[in-house]
Amino acid sequence: MESKSYYESILSSDRRRSSTVPDRCLEAELSSDRSRIVYSNAFRRMQQKAQVFSLEDNPGVRSRLTHTMEVADCGCLIASQIADSLIKINKLKTEQKQPFIRAVENACLLHDIGNPPFGHFGEIAIQKWFEKYGQDALKASIKKRKSGTPKSSEIDSYIQSKFRDFTLFDGNPQGLRTVTRLISSEDQYGLNLTYTTILSIVKYISSPEKVNNEPLSKKPGYFSTEEDIVKECRSKLNIVEQSRMPFTYIMEAADDISYCISDIEDGIEKQIICANDFFIGLKEEMVKLGLKDEQFPGDAITKMIRQKGQKAETMLPFKTPFARAMIKCAAETFVKERSKIVNGTLSEIFSEESSEGLSLKAIKNVARKLLFCSSEAEYPEIAGYNIIFGLLNCLKPLLECEVDVFKEMVSSPDNSQKGYELCSRLVRRLPNKHRKSYSDQVEKISGKGNSENVLNEWHFRAHMIVDFIAGMTDNFALDTYQRLQGIRIA
């Protein structure tokens, strides 16, 4: 139940590791989060990760980074309107407005930071590789042990639980892992963000093991390796397990508003379609969905329609009123449904049955038909899939190593192991920060049973390899694949 102290509870300046700068106010701490995000190398790398079109040379076409900045701007506009409304009904203090907006902005800035190269096709490649080869690599590693070998029942239990981190791999939990573990080799807390910012990027409420058909559990929100971090954040902010942070709803709405328009604009920029193609397709989809012109947010269709014989030449007369109306609707819906948001019973701000939800669906359907199925989009996706799959094939020998041999290679990468000359060279290709994160996690399980240690070590090892690939830009993934395959040497 929402109370007057609700936002005081979830807007927190506390961090997992205490800040080295004392006595900063809440707004300053959340602003510090923003600085940590935008100055991080993971954030910068998004400028060479695809939004829709991979390996794109045209700077007028959006990358993940430019898309992220647009989502953050949209999120701030929604948050500002919500904060004003909450202040009027005495649910938010005036001095909490800027922290409220900053919390949403931080969530928006981080919402795509865990996406692998080549976007969703990169995610699928990782999932499919582990479905096909992951278990064999695990068993090959175990088979090389002379003692302390896990029983078949223990292996089966692992495959039914933690192994799903890989077969259900997703960029959202990878983003959480990135900012809490991987960005800094000097700090085991990653960016050491506030509890508020960390929990605001958890888009789904379950680990891969507990994924089901419920709206907030249909995908993993965090991996098994970060489950303790999520529990800690929930405990500190008094967020119940079946709900998510209210700022997450706003981030999700801002993403929906931003990408449905920007994808079309990018298609026009690349001359795959023209504005008139879009509007013809949109009208067809509206008829299928039973959506009338006057129901479209911002009266955008009516304003866009030209007299008979004239063609639409630009998206601007449509884009501006549509975005403005959607932002207003998102803010109003949030305030109206805030009890459901707090209780975790609202699945999304734009419901599928609303005119706003149907409008988004219509635009997305047009993009799917005219853009996502185009050769300009699909050829790079197919190449990207094979690049990611191929990288995992190249790194497979590391997953087949015996546990003690692999740990020795990571701790002393300059010493080549006899019989493991290829693996030694592959280990040296892994970033120091990833090797450090792996070693930190392995050290924490050193007191557990021997067979359990073997499975946990392999789990952390597999995550390290996926971390390496997921953190690559599209260009670097292509370059690394060509080098490892011997296609290109220099």
Image (cartoon, helix red, strand yellow):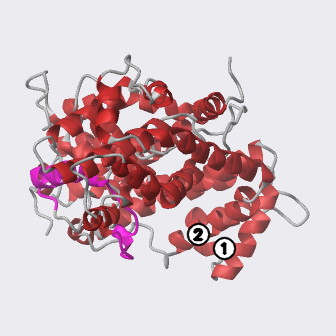
Q: Secondary structure at mark 1?
A: helix
Q: Earlier in the sequence, mark 1 or mark 2?
A: 1
363 up-or-down from 9: above or below:
below
219 in the magenta segment = yes
Q: Badge 1: how crowded within 10 Å, few (<14), some, or many (20+)?
A: some
Query: Is 177 situated above or below 243?
Result: above
Q: Secondary structure at mark 2?
A: helix
Q: Is residue 400 above or below residue 215?
A: above
Q: Nearer the viewer, mark 1 or mark 2?
A: 2
**Is 188 on the left or on the right of 272, as rendered?**
left
- Left or right: 365 in relation to 428: right
Give 125 or 143, whichever is nearer the viewer: 143
Direction from residue 72 to residue 356 in the image, left or right: right
Residue 146 placement (x, y as % from top left): 27, 46
Mark count: 2
Report the residue marked by disc 2.
361
Q: Residues within 10 Å of mark 2 (few under 14, many from 20)?
A: some
Q: Which residues are magenta?
A: 211-239
Q: Amino acid at mark 1?
A: Asp
Quadrant housing residue 308: bottom right
Viewer-nearest residue: 440 or 26:
440
> Residue, x 45% and y 29% (percent of image)?
419
